[in-house]
Amino acid sequence: MTTRLRDLLSGPIFWFTLGVIVMVAATAARELIFDRDEEAATPPKAGSAELVIYSGKDESIGGQRQKLIDEWNADPANKNTPARLVSLPANADAQHSQMRATAQSEVSDADIYNLDTTWTAAFASAGFILPLDPSTDTAGFLPAPLQTCTYDGRLWALPFNTDAGLLYHRKGVLDSAKPSGLPPGPNDVRALRDAVRGIEAGFVTPLDMYEGLTVSALEAIWAEDGEVYDAERDLVVIDSEEARSGLRKLARSMQSVDGLPPALYPSSTTLDENGSREAFRGGKVALMRNWPVAYGQLRAGERAMTDFDVWELPGSSVLGGQNLAVARSTDDPAAAQRLIRFLTSEESEIRLFRDGGLAATRASAYTDPSVTAKRPYAETLKSALDSARARPVTTHYALFSSTFQEIVREALAKDGELPGDAVARLTKALHGQV
C-alpha cells in the first residue's frame, strides 16, 4: 500500500465519507422496514368476492332486508360473491357521517352504499360512488324515487325503498274531522278532543335536532305555500311571508288556545319518529305524522294496536327513501350492480313492502293482491307518493339540512320569528361554506 493511499484511508475525509455511506444505508434500511411494517399493519380488505353493503338500521318488520341478503347468499349462483350487511345507526345524520368516513378511508371495504335520497348528488360529485351501467333497466320504477338516483345527467343508483309521510289517526276520528291543514286549527283540536278522550295534544310530528326536523319544518312551510330554496333561480327564499307564516304556525301550535289541548304536542321538540309513534300509541295525541313503516310497527309485538288508520297528509309530503349505489372502493363493480338489481327487483320490492312495511319503489307492488291484502293503505300511500316533493338537491345537503335545523329551532324558540341572518346562513350552506 502506498503512503498516499494509506494516508487517505486513515484520514478524516475517509472516515467522514464512510460515515455518510453508513448513515444513508441505515436510513434506507429503516425506511424499508417501516414501509413493510406499515403495510403489514394495514387491515386487509374484505375478500374481493364478498360484497359489503353499508346501510342504516333495518327497521322493516321481521328484518326483510337481511332475509333478502340470506336468499342471495343461499343461491349457488352467488357462492363466489356472498353479501354482508353492515348495519349503521337508525339516525340519518349519524349514517351520513359514518358512510362518508368510510368512503374517504384508504382501506374502505364498502361495495355498496344504501344512501338517503338526499345524499346521491353529494356522493356522486365527491367520487365516492360509480355511475351505473348506461344499459341498466329502469322500467317499472316510480318516477319520483328514480329521479333521486340521477345527478348531472347520469344514473348513480337504483331506489331501494321510497317514503311519503302519512297522517295516522285513531279510528274514533271520523273522516269528516280530518283537519284541512297541519298543525290542526282550534276547531280541529276541539273535534279531536271530543273524539279521543284524554289526549294531551291534537297532533305529533318529529321536531328533534335531526333530519326529522328538516322534514317537519319543510312540510309546515309548504302547507302555507312557502318555500325554502328556489332551484330555478338558485336563491334561498325562506324569508318570504308564506315561509314565515309556516314557522309561526308551527311555533304557536304548541301553545294551548281557549283552554283546549295544544294543536301540536309540545314534547315534539325532543322526539324522533320512534318517540312520535309511542306518543300516538300511548293515547297522548289523536293524530301523528309518520312514515309508512310505522303502520306495521304499531301492529306488531305484544303492544300491538289496531284502533288506527291512515290518511294522506292534507298538504304535500317530503319524499323520503334510500338508494343503492356502487362504492368506488369495490373490487367487483359488475357483481355489486348485479346485487343491486336483485335487491330492487319486482319480487324483492313486493316482499319488502308486503312483509316488511317498507314503501316499494316499483308501481306493480301497489296493485299486487298479496300486498293489498296485508297493506290495506297501499292505495293511499301510492297517492301520497305521487304528490310528494323532493328536498333541495345540493351536493352539500348535509350542511344545508343541519343549518336549516338550527334556524328552525331558533325560530320555534321565538314564536316562529325567523333569525335575521337566516338567508345568508342557508346560502352559505348550499355552497358548502360553514
Image (cartoon, grey):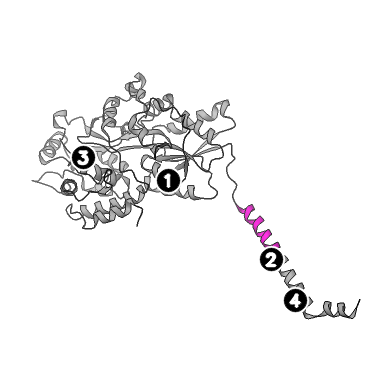
Disc 4 marks which residue? 16
Magenta residue span: 27-44
Disc 2 marks which residue? 27
Disc 3 marks which residue? 285
**Along the polypeptide, which appears first: circle 1 or circle 3?**
1
- Judge whether residue 302 can be spotted in this image: no
CA gap, disc 4 and disc 1? 55 Å
**Along the polypeptide, which appears first: circle 3 or circle 4?**
4
Q: Residue at x 43, y 24 (%)?
A: 347
Element assignment for label 1: helix
**Residue 51 point in image, percent of width and height:** 53, 37
| Residue 56, image quadrant | top left
Q: Main secondary structure of the magenta part?
A: helix
CA gap, disc 1 and disc 2? 42 Å
- Judge whether residue 398 can be spotted in this image: yes
Tell me the kind of residue under disc 2. Answer: Thr
